[in-house]
Image: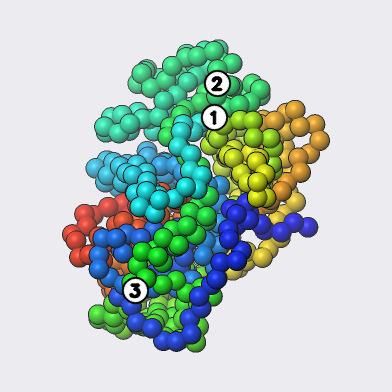
Amino acid sequence: MRKNYSPWIHQLDKSREHRSLRQDLQADTVVVGAGIAGIATSFFILKYTKRSVVVLEKFKLAHGATGHNAGQVASYFEKGFTAMVQEFGADLAVKGQQSIDDAWGLLEEMYTDATLDIFFSRGLGHDGYSTFEQVVRALEEARLKREHGLVPEHMAVAVHAPFIDAIPPQYAGLYRAVPHKQVLEMLETSNPLFMAVSSQKRGCVNSALFCEKMLEYLTATYPKRFALYEHAPVHKIILHTDSALLDADSHTVTAKQVVLCTNGFENLHIINENGLEVDARYHHLLRGRVAYMSAYLEKPDNPPVATSYETPAEPTEDLPYYYLTRRPYEFQRGEEHNLISIGGPEEPFEDELYSRESEYPEYAMDILSKFIHDIYAPEHHTPVTYEFTWHGLMGYTQNGMRMVGPEPQNAILLYNLGCNGVGILPSIMGGRKIARHVAGEQVPKSIFDIPRR
Ligand SMILES: Cc1cc2nc3c(=O)[nH]c(=O)nc-3n(C[C@H](O)[C@H](O)[C@H](O)COP(=O)(O)OP(=O)(O)OC[C@H]3O[C@@H](n4cnc5c(N)ncnc54)[C@H](O)[C@@H]3O)c2cc1C
C-alpha cells in the first residue's frame, strides 16, 4: 500500500511556521488558494498595485496540484493549437499562445525579484512520436503556428520511417529527415518504436518549493500588505456590489475583491447578492481527473531533461502519453542524486470529492514500471524501487482553457483557475492578468475570459 508523497513536498521546509486565522479581517484583495496561481497572483498584485492581499488556504501552501505535478515548465496547451484556432479564431488563439510564451518572462521576473537560487533548468524538451497520425497531428500544429507568425516546434523524422514519403507536402520545412539513431538518442531510448521527435523550450522546477521561497520573499517585502493564512478553508463567499464577505472557518474576511485560485470549486458556495446566480452550475464547469506519478533516484550522471513519449497505443483516455523529467535532486542534505519522475496514467474523477490521502494504486505503478523497462531504461532488469509515488487533481474546464478574469455576473469575484493539464506557466500568466484587472486596466478580450452562462 503506497502513500501519496511527492518529491516536491519532500523538499519543503517542515519547520516553517503556519499562520492561522484567529480573528475577523479586512483586506483589499483576498486570494483563495495558495498554489502557484495564488502565489503568482499575489506577487503581481503586490508589485503592480498598492492593494493589500490576504491569502486564505484551506490546507497548506503548495500542497495541491502545485506540490503534486511533474514540474515541467512548458508553454503548450493540452487542447492543441489547431483546436484553439477552430474554437476561438486565429487572432485570439495566437494571442493566447503568445501570452503563455511570454509567461516564461514573468516566471523569470518572479525568480529574479525574489533572488531565488533554487533549481530551475531551461533548455530544450522533446516529444517522441511513433505513428504517422501522431507525426501529422504535431506537424499540423507547427504548420498553423508558422502560418500565424508563431515559432513552430522543429521535428526530426527518422529517414527510414515507413511513413516518411507519405508526409503531405504542406509540412515541408517543418521537419528534417535524420538517421533513426539520432531520434532515439534525443529521446534517450533504444526502443525503435519512436520514429520522430519534436523539440521546444522546456524547463524543470519544483513549483512547491518555488511557492515556499516566493512566500518568504512576499512576507519580507510587503510586511504590511501581505499575509497568508493556512488551515483557513473558505466555505462561503457572499458577493455584494462593492465588497465581498468570506466565511473562512469560524471567521469572516471582508474584501473589495476576491480571486479564486482554487484549481476547482471544491466545497465552495458562492452567493451573489448583486444579481444573477453565480453558484448554480459551478461544479460542472470543471471536470476532475486524477493523474498518477512515480519517481526514483539514480546517480547524478546525466543532465536535466523534460520529455514526453507517445507509443502506438496512445493517446487514450487513461494514458494520454508518458512524461518524464530528470533533474538534480537533494534527497537528504548533502546527498546528490538525479530524480527520474514519470507520469502518464490518469482517471476521471467526477462524483466523489478528491482526497489527497487516497492510496496510490498498484496498477499505476505497474504501468510506469513497464514504461521504464520498455522505453527509458531497459537495463533495469529488476523493477525500480520508487522513492516517491503521488497523485494530483487536474481540473478541466469545458473549453479546455484556464479561466482568468472577472465573473460576468459580478466583477468583485475573479478567477485564476482550471488546470487543463499544463498549469505552471498559465497560472503565472493568469496572475499577471488578474493584477491588471485589479489595477483597473482595460484588459483585452482573450481565450481565458470566463464564458457567459
Ligand atoms: C500529476 C500532475 C502532473 C502535472 N504536471 C504538470 C507539468 O509538468 N507542467 C505544468 O505546467 N503543469 C502540470 N500540472 C498542472 C499544474 O500542476 C497545475 O495546473 C498547477 O499547479 C495549478 O496550480 P493552482 O495554484 O491553480 O492549483 P493548486 O496547486 O491545486 O492550488 C489550489 C489551492 O487552493 C486551495 N483551496 C481549494 N479550495 C479552497 C477553499 N475553499 N478555501 C481555501 N483554499 C482552497 C487548495 O487547498 C490548494 O492549495 C500537473 C498536474 C498534475 C496533477
Image coordinates of residue 170 in percent, x first then y, are 35, 21
**Mark on residue 224?**
3
Q: Dot 2: few (<14), some (14–19), or many (≥20) neighbours within 10 Å? A: many
- Residue where numbered disc 2 is placed: 183
N-term mark: 1 or 2 = 1
Indicate which label's residue lies in the foreground, 3 or 1. Answer: 3
User: Residue placed at 67% from the left, 50% from the top?
Assistant: 332
Q: Kindly check if marks 3 and 1 are in contact, taking CB atoms under 8 A apart as contact.
A: no
Q: Label 3 vs label 1: CA separation?
A: 49 Å
Residue at 27% x, 52% y is 446
Circle 1 residues within 10 Å: few <14, some 14–19, many ≥20:
many
- Distance from label 2 to label 3 (Cα)? 54 Å
**Circle 1/circle 2 CB separation < 8 Å:** yes
- Outermost residue on the right side: it is 382
Image quarter of residue 192: top right
Counting residues from the start of the chain, the first of labels 2 and 3 encountered is 2
For the residue pair 412 and 67, the one nearer the viewer reads as 67
What's the mark number on residue 128?
1
Image quarter in which the C terminus is found: bottom left
Is disc 2 in contact with disc 3, using a CB cutoff of under 8 Å? no
The answer to which of 264 and 351 lies nearer the viewer is 264
Q: Tell me the crowding category of disc 3: few under 14, some 14 to 19, or many 20 or more residues within 10 angstroms, Cα based.
A: few
Q: Nearer the viewer, residue 216 or 230?
A: 216
Q: Quadrant of the N terminus?
A: bottom right
Q: Nearer the viewer, mark 2 or mark 3?
A: 3
How far separated are the C-alphas under marks 1 and 2?
8 Å
Give the amino acid at mark 1.
Gly
Give the residue at x 25% y 80%: 242
